[in-house]
Amino acid sequence: MHRILLIEDDEAISEMVRSYLVKEGYEVETAFDGEVAERTFRTNNPFDLVLLDLMLPKRSGTDILQTIRATSLVPVLIMSAKDSDVDKALGLGFGADDYITKPFSMIELAARVKAAIRRAGYATPIIQPEAPIPANQKISIGGLTVDLDNFSALKNGEEVKLTSKEFHILKLFVTHPGRVFTKAQIYASVWADDYFGDENVINVHMRRLREKIEDDPSHPEFIKTLWGIGYKLGEQL
């Protein structure tokens, strides 16, 4: 049985979501403020998914998300009444996996929960590497070293803190030098799901990745944009 941590300060909404997910076969733990949420996550882990409201008392949802991402790659689905692209970008930029806007239907929420848990179970990208991978599973390009075994990266010898999605996007490019990827292909490989044209998700993760690995994110050298087509690894690296 999959375990879900539901972090929502509105007790009526929390009970509605909890009851529905329990009927769907999930085990659900609840928290109504940020401090309890952090304590519950630390003491009752592992969870298979976290449902997280952004507006919480005592500690904000973004604080909780950063705390979770410091130690865990568990899927995080944000629930919020805020419906601006800025809020979506903020949540996804901090490492959330998906975003649903209140009010939402229980059917849609259950579908997103199921999809997020399913996606979290994939082990390797759908697209297999074209380039031979060294025995030690490390690939160096320019000043960037990608450690495929340890899911980590170094830039000029300094650790680059990447989210799971950012790492798998980077891995996709460094194992396919010279290949151009459309947004649909990136989404299918990294998210292991069908792409329905939501460019915001790809744009946010690509921007955040470039901010971490590029000297000048506005003029990227590692991951180049081919306008109207997609992205590819820089040829000069």
Image: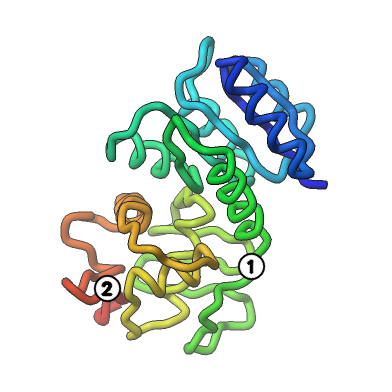
Q: Residue at x 51, y 84 (%)?
A: 129
Instruction: Classify mark 1: residues with Cα within 10 Å, few (<14), some (14-19) or many (20+).
Output: few
N-term-proximal mark, 2 vs 1: 1
> Label 1 sits on what residue type?
Asp
> Label 2 sits on what residue type?
Gly
* Residue 230 numbered mark, or none: 2
43 or 174: nearer the eye? 43
Q: Is residue 113 above or below residue 236?
A: above
State the image quarter where residue 217 is shown: bottom left
Distance from label 2 to label 1 (Cα)?
27 Å
Q: Give how far across and how far down residue 222 sits, in percent.
A: 30, 68
Q: Give how far across and how far down residue 22 sits, in percent.
A: 76, 36
220 or 82: nearer the eye? 82
Q: Secondary structure at mark 2?
A: strand
Q: Give how far across and how far down residue 179 sits, in percent.
A: 35, 84
Q: Residue furthest right?
A: 1
* Residue 149 numbered mark, or none: 1
Q: Residue at x 59, y 55 (%)?
A: 115
Quadrant in which the C terminus is drawn: bottom left
Q: Give how far across and how far down residue 236 sits, in percent.
A: 25, 80
132 or 72: nearer the eye? 72
Question: In the displayed structure, does residue 173 sit left or right of residue 40?
Answer: left
Front label number (2 vs 1): 2
Q: Residue at x 41, y 37 (%)?
A: 91
